[in-house]
């Protein structure tokens, strides 16, 4: 799913849901913003699976560590990008600081989903030149063997756009709930392909946004979604995630070389 979403059916779907929100929050939240349910700064060691992708030295997207030597991200984050220009950072909270737990690795191999077409199958794997040394600050997430559970509270995270700037210096998190399949189909519109995506409704003043792309949507130690797209340029409507459960067999086949 491209981050340039088809929003032709958005208005009626949002009226039914009663959705109204704004993306992210200030890099250093006010007391009121810190109190918003589901949004805020990530605590140290809270999200050890979260990594960030830099291309030619610039922060570009998020990602998730699924093996010590493998990262999964959105295909649109790495389309046309060579492995030699990529670097993966893990174990830190801030873009602007070199932290004691921080590690970084070069990328030796990029594997795009073979059916990615700029809209669907938005998933890619990055093999690291050297595995990360796992620690309290750097851990993996499990791949799902069953569909995303309905009614669960999922955590999305990243350093993406805030209300005041193109990125947040600090890693942020937000709790989100997935919509029904029917609602997701209505929100996404003509580009919807059954089973390939999950949709989430934003919480008040909290949502994923640009440059959160490629990051995780997780629940109970399992990666269920990859941030893929947003319903509007303001990130104040719905968000779309690649449905990882659909791609678990492909991911494992690549990692295991089968």
Image (cartoon, helix red, strand yellow):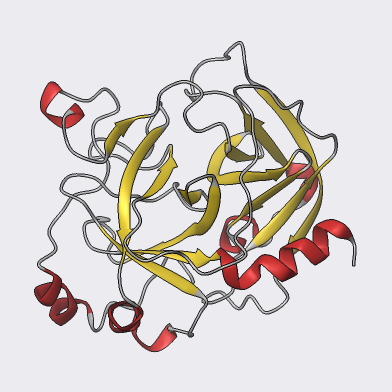
Q: Residue at x 46, y 65 (%)?
A: 148
Point 48% across, 85% down: residue: 194
Q: Is residue 122 visible?
A: no
Q: Is residue 57 visible?
A: yes
The residue lying furthest to the top in this view is 100
x 15%, y 48%: residue:
204
Front position in the image: 239 or 118: 239
List x then y, in percent, for residue 151: 31, 61
Is residue 149 placed above or below 105 in the rendered structure? below
* Image quadrant where residue 171 sits: top left
Q: Tell which residue pokes out farthest to the bottom in this image.
A: 190
Question: In the displayed structure, does residue 251 sit left or right of residue 74?
Answer: right
Q: Is residue 169 left or right of residue 176?
A: right
Identify whether 19 is placed above or below 108: below
**Residue 176: x percent and y percent?**
31, 53
Judging depth in this view, the residue of 108 and 18 nearest the camera is 18
* Quadrant in the rendering for residue 221: top right
Q: Quadrant of residue 152?
A: bottom left
Please tell me how many numbered marks the rendered image carries. 0
Seen in the picture, residue 139 relative to 91 is either above or below; the reply is: below
């Amino acid at each position: 799913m491209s981050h340039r979403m088809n929003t032709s059916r958005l208005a009626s779907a949002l009226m039914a849901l009663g959705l109204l929100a704004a993306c992210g929050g200030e890099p250093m939240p006010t007391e009121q913003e810190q109190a918003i349910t589901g949004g805020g700064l990530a605590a140290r060691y809270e999200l050890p699976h979260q990594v960030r992708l830099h291309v030619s030295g610039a922060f570009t997207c998020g990602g998730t560590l699924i093996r010590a030597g493998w990262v999964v991200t959105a295909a649109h984050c790495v389309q046309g990008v060579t492995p030699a220009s990529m670097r993966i950072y893990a174990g830190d909270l801030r873009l602007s600081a070199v932290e004691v737990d921080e590690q970084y690795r070069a990328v030796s191999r990029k594997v795009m989903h073979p059916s990615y077409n700029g809209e669907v199958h938005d998933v890619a794997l990055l093999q690291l030149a050297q595995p990360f040394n796992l620690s309290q600050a750097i851990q993996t997430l499990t791949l799902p063997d069953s569909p995303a559970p309905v009614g669960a509270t999922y955590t999305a995270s990243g350093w993406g756009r805030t209300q005041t700037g193109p990125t947040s210096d600090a890693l942020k998190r937000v709790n989100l709930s997935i919509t029904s399949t029917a609602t997701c189909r209505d929100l996404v519109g003509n580009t919807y392909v059954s089973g390939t995506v999950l949709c989430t409704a934003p919480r008040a003043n909290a949502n994923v946004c640009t440059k959160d792309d490629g990051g995780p949507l997780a629940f109970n130690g399992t990666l269920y979604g990859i941030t893929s797209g947003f319903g509007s340029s303001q990130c104040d409507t719905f968000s779309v995630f690649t449905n990882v459960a659909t791609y678990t067999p492909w991911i494992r086949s690549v990692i295991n070389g089968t």
